[in-house]
């Protein structure tokens, strides 16, 4: 491993990037903290710096992001406190004068026009919602972020591959000619650490018991990661004249350990500086080893709280992948 530089907001990797570099970085930095982590209080959300185990404020986090190009906010899709945290981060970045771009797993490439039209005021909200296929929990969890972007004229990237394409890939169907513009120019399915995490998560999953089906599910997962990574790097490449920070919203599996979307973003531009925030709800059953494993997933952990209500609609995914 050569030319690796670490600093307060993330990692600057120079030269060829391999998945294992991200794994090495996270495991190396987290191991330096206290070996006997304190118990988590599940009554209030809090943000923890995984380098030293100290709690930090959103203001402190955003100050740490001053030199970053991309921050990956790996979420729990239906968690109220987690989505409020995302909005708080975006708001504070804007308050501190940063030029922010919001990138989303929740909107797909073929609805970018509808997203742009709504943000610019060319269409009303009803037309936007009819055209953009929002997730079921859009009103309470993503609408506040989109409305903030609209009010502050922030670009929003519909970064994910269309769910019909991901679904076809998981079923082994050939790509339709009309869908070619909406898939990443390159997608790989290397059997690496990300594959190991994916296969362990999907083990025993309905419809994914056989090796062939699991491979197809993984190919679909990688399409999503490569699509989001390409959207981020293409935007930064075409807007290199303007110093921007991309805030990418995704399920934490897509960004944990610096794998998934993170590593594929860095494969496309190894010099990007990034920070990974993961989310987890603390549990009384968590042992110190469990907490350390959670901390190893990112540079920061947002310890969320359980929703006050339990009848909120689940987020809509194109399939049952993480």
Image: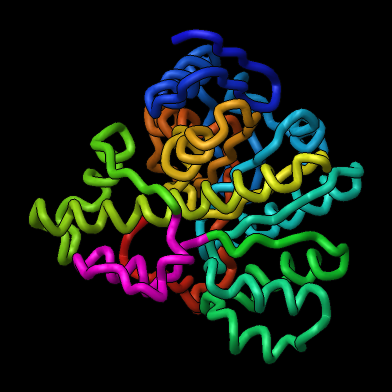
Q: Is residue 305 left or right of residue 318?
A: right
Could you say which quadrant of the image residue 309 lies in?
Answer: bottom right
Residue 164 part of the magenta segment: yes
Question: Which stretch appears magenta?
Answer: 160-184
Percent x, y of residue 17 = 46, 24
Name the residue rendered at 55%, 9% in the picture. 3
Is the residue 197 above or below the residue 163 in the image?
A: above
Residue 12 lies, in percent from the top left, at 62, 22
Q: As drawn, is 66 to the left or to the right of 17? A: right
Which residue shows up at 73% across the image and 86% down it?
125
Question: In the image, residue 98 lies at what x, y percent?
Answer: 85, 43
Q: Residue at x 10, y 51 (%)?
A: 211
The N terminus is located in which quarter?
Answer: top left
Q: Is residue 143 above or below residue 294?
A: below
Q: In this rendering, would 207 be left or right of 80?
A: left
Q: As drawn, which residue projects farthest toward the front? A: 177
């Amino acid at each position: 491993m050569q030319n690796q530089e670490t600093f307060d907001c993330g990692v600057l990797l120079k030269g060829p990037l391999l998945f294992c570099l991200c794994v090495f970085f996270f495991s190396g930095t987290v191991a330096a903290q206290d070996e006997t982590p304190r118990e988590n209080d599940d009554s209030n959300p809090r943000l923890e710096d995984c380098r030293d185990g100290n709690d930090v404020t959103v203001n402190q986090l955003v100050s740490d992001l001053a030199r970053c190009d991309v921050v990956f906010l790996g979420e729990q899709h239906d968690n109220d406190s987690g989505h409020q945290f995302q909005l708080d981060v975006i708001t504070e970045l804007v308050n501190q004068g940063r030029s922010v771009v919001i990138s989303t797993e929740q909107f797909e490439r073929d609805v970018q026009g509808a997203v742009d039209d709504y943000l610019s005021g060319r269409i009303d909200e009803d037309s936007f919602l009819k055209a953009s296929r929002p997730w079921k929990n859009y009103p309470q969890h993503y609408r506040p972020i989109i409305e903030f972007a609209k009010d502050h004229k922030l670009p929003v990237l519909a970064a994910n591959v269309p769910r019909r394409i991901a679904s076809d890939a998981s079923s082994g169907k050939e790509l339709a000619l009309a869908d070619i513009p909406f898939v990443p120019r390159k997608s790989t399915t290397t059997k690496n650490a990300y594959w190991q995490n994916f296969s362990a998560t999907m083990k025993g999953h309905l419809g994914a018991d056989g090796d062939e089906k699991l491979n197809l599910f993984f190919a679909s997962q990688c399409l999503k990661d490569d699509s989001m990574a390409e959207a981020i790097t293409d935007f930064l490449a075409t807007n290199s004249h303007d110093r921007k920070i991309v805030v990418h919203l995704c399920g934490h599996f897509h960004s944990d350990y610096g794998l998934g979307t993170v590593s594929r973003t860095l494969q496309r531009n190894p010099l990007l500086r990034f920070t990974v925030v993961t989310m987890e709800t603390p549990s009384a059953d968590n042992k110190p080893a469990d907490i350390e494993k959670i901390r190893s997933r990112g540079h920061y952990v947002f310890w969320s709280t359980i929703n006050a209500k339990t009848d909120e609609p689940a987020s809509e995914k194109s399939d049952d992948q993480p």
